[in-house]
Image: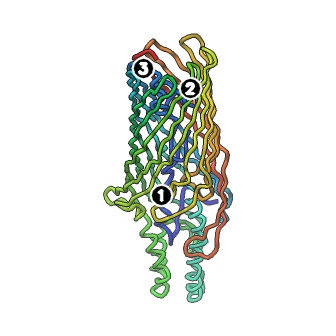
C-alpha cells in the first residue's frame, strides 16, 4: 500500500500542489448557513435558539427587542472555544483500499461582544463578532487529492518510461527497469486561517407597548491567510542498478544522461513539469470588505410572550488577493485577483414564551437564501451548486432554581440544500443535529455568568464521480464520504447597569 503523506504527478504538478493548500476557505464551523455563523454567544450555546430573545445578545439576534430593557447601559462579553474534526474517506480505482483523511479545526478564541444603551423609546446597540470563517484548519495526512495524484503517478510513470526501457533493451539486450517505480513520499506543511469579523450597529424604536422596529448595518471584513510549502518529494523502486529513492526530477535527469540524446526528447516535458512543481512556497492573503443591512420587528403581546422577525440582506463580499514576496505557489495565487465570497440573505422568525416564573422556552426558524449566491468563487465560472435554500429549526428551554441558578438545554436541526457539485474535499455541507446545554448564574445584581456546551452530529454525505488524469485517456471512478463532529464550549459575562 502507498504511503498516505505523499503525492506527485509529473504533468500536472502545479495544479496538484495547491489542491493541497486550497482547503476549507468558506463554510461555517457550527450553527448557521453555508458561510454564516449564528452561534454568537454563550447564551446561544446553552439554548441553541435566540431569535426572540430580549437579553443583551439581542444586539445580534433581535435588535428590535431591546426596547423592552429598562433605561441604562448593558454589556456582554463572550468567548467560544470550538473544535471540529472533519473525516473524509475516499475510494478510488487506483487505491489499494479506501483511505481516510482527518482534518482538525481548533479555535480557542472566538469572541463576541455586545453593548446596549436604552433611553426612553430608543435602544442603541452594537456588537463585534466573527460572522463567518472557520478558524485555523490543518490536515495532518493530506487530502484525497494527495492520494489520487499518488495513485495516478505510478501507472503514468510506468507508461512513459516503458518505451525507454524497451528502446534500451533493443539496443543492449538488457532491461534497465526504469519504469519499475513503486513508491513515493513528500513533506507538505500548510496552515489556512479564515476569519470574517463583523461590526454591527443598530437603532431600535418602540412604536407602542406591543410593537418595536430596528434597523442596523454590519461591516464585514473577510480574510483568508495561506502559508505552506511542499518539499522533500521522492519516488522509489528497484531498477537494474538496484533500489533507488530520489527526487523525481533528478531521477528523470539521471535517466536522460544515461540513455543518450535519442531518447532525451521524450523525457523533457516530464522533466520540465517536475522542475516547475517542486520546492513550492506560498504566502498569500485574501482580504475584502462588505456591508450587511439588517432590519427587525418585535411583537410583545404580553409580559410572557415575545415574537421576533429579522431579515439580513445579502452581503456582497469580494476578496482581493495579495501575494507576499512573490510566494505564489507556482502560480496558484495571482496578486490582485478578486475572489467572490458573498454571504446569503437570511430570514429568522422566533418565539419566546414564559408559561411560569420558573420556566421559559424559545423556538425559531432560520431560512437562508442560498440560490442567488455564486459559491464557486469565480466571476467567470457558473456552477449550479444549490438545489434549494437551506433552513434550520431550533428549540430551547430553561428552568430557574431560585434567583441565582438557571439550567437550560436546546436542539438545532440544520438542513442544507446543496447538491453534489457543492460537495468536495475542501468544503462540504451536511444535515446535522446539535444538542446544547448549560447554566446561567447570577453572580450579583449587576453580573450574570453563562456557561454552555454543544455537540453537533452530522449525517454522513457521499459523492460519486469520475475524472481523467492529465495526459491519459482512461477515466478513474471515485467515491468519497464526508463526516464531521463539532464541539463548542462557551463562557459569557453580562453586565447589567440598569434593571432589566
Q: Which residue is mark 3?
A: 495
Q: Residue 314, position in %: x, y?
A: 47, 48
Q: Which residue is mark 2?
A: 306
Q: Earlier in the sequence, mark 2 or mark 3?
A: 2
Q: Earlier in the sequence, mark 3 or mark 1?
A: 1
Which of the pair 38/344 is nearer the observer? 344
Q: CA distance from mark 1 to mark 2?
A: 39 Å
Residues at discs 2 and 3 in contact (Cβ within 8 Å): no
User: Under tag 1, what secondary structure?
Assistant: loop
Residue 170, visible in the rendered structure: yes
User: Under tag 2, what secondary structure?
Assistant: strand
Q: Is residue 86 above or below residue 465?
A: above
Q: Residue 82, position in %: x, y?
A: 52, 36
Q: Which residue is mark 1?
A: 377
Residue 30, visible in the rendered structure: no
Q: Residue 236, position in %: x, y?
A: 55, 66
Tell me what residue is drawn at x 64 percent, y 19 percent.
355
Amino acid at each position: 500500500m502507498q504511503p498516505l503523506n505523499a503525492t506527485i504527478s509529473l504533468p500536472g504538478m502545479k495544479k496538484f500542489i495547491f489542491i493541497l493548500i486550497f482547503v476549507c476557505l468558506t463554510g461555517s464551523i457550527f450553527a448557521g448557513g453555508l458561510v454564516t455563523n449564528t452561534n454568537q454567544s454563550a447564551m446561544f450555546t446553552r439554548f441553541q435558539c435566540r431569535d426572540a430573545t430580549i437579553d443583551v445578545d439581542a444586539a445580534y439576534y433581535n435588535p428590535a427587542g431591546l426596547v423592552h430593557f429598562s433605561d441604562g447601559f448593558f454589556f456582554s462579553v463572550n468567548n467560544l472555544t470550538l473544535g471540529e474534526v472533519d473525516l473524509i474517506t475516499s475510494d478510488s480505482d487506483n487505491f489499494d483500499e479506501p483511505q481516510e483523511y482527518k482534518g482538525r479545526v481548533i479555535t480557542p478564541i472566538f469572541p463576541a461582544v455586545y453593548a446596549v444603551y436604552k433611553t426612553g423609546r430608543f435602544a442603541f446597540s452594537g456588537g463585534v463578532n466573527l460572522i463567518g470563517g472557520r478558524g485555523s484548519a490543518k490536515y495532518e495526512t493530506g487530502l484525497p487529492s494527495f492520494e489520487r495524484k499518488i495513485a495516478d503517478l505510478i501507472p503514468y510513470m510506468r507508461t512513459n518510461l516503458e518505451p525507454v526501457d524497451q528502446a534500451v533493451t533493443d539496443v543492449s539486450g538488457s532491461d534497465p527497469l526504469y519504469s519499475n517505480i513503486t513508491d513515493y513520499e513528500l513533506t507538505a506543511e500548510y496552515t489556512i486561517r479564515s476569519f470574517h469579523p463583523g461590526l454591527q450597529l443598530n437603532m431600535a424604536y418602540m412604536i407602542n407597548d406591543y410593537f418595536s422596529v430596528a434597523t442596523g448595518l454590519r461591516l464585514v471584513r473577510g480574510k483568508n491567510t495561506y502559508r505552506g510549502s511542499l518539499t522533500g518529494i521522492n519516488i522509489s523502486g528497484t531498477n537494474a542498478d538496484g533500489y533507488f529513492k530520489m527526487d523525481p526530477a533528478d531521477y528523470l535527469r539521471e535517466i536522460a544522461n544515461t540513455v543518450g540524446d535519442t531518447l532525451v526528447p521524450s523525457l523533457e516535458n516530464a522533466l520540465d513539469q517536475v522542475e516547475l512543481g517542486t520546492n513550492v512556497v506560498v504566502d498569500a492573503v485574501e482580504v475584502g470588505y462588505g456591508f450587511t443591512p439588517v432590519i427587525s420587528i418585535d411583537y410583545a403581546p404580553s409580559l410572557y410572550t415575545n415574537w421576533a422577525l429579522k431579515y439580513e440582506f445579502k452581503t456582497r463580499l469580494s476578496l482581493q488577493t495579495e501575494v507576499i514576496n512573490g510566494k505564489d505557489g507556482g502560480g496558484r495565487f495571482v496578486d490582485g485577483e478578486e475572489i467572490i465570497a458573498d454571504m446569503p440573505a437570511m430570514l429568522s422568525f422566533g418565539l419566546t414564551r414564559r408559561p411560569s416564573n420558573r420556566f421559559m422556552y424559545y423556538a425559531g426558524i432560520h431560512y437562508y437564501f442560498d440560490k442567488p449566491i455564486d459559491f464557486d468563487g469565480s466571476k467567470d465560472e457558473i456552477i449550479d451548486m444549490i438545489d434549494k435554500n437551506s433552513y434550520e429549526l431550533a428549540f430551547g428551554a430553561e428552568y430557574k432554581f431560585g434567583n441565582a441558578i438557571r439550567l437550560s438545554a436546546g436542539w438545532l436541526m440544520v438542513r442544507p440544500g446543496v447538491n453534489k457539485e457543492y460537495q468536495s474535499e475542501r468544503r462540504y455541507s451536511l444535515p446535522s443535529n446539535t444538542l446544547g446545554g448549560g447554566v446561567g448564574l447570577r453572580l450579583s445584581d449587576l453580573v450574570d455568568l453563562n456557561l454552555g456546551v454543544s455537540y453537533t452530529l452530522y449525517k454522513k454525505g457521499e459523492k460519486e464521480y469520475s475524472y481523467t488524469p492529465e495526459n491519459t485517456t482512461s477515466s478513474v471512478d471515485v467515491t468519497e464520504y464526508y463526516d464531521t463532529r463539532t464541539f463548542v464550549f462557551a463562557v459569557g459575562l453580562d453586565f447589567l447597569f440598569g434593571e432589566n
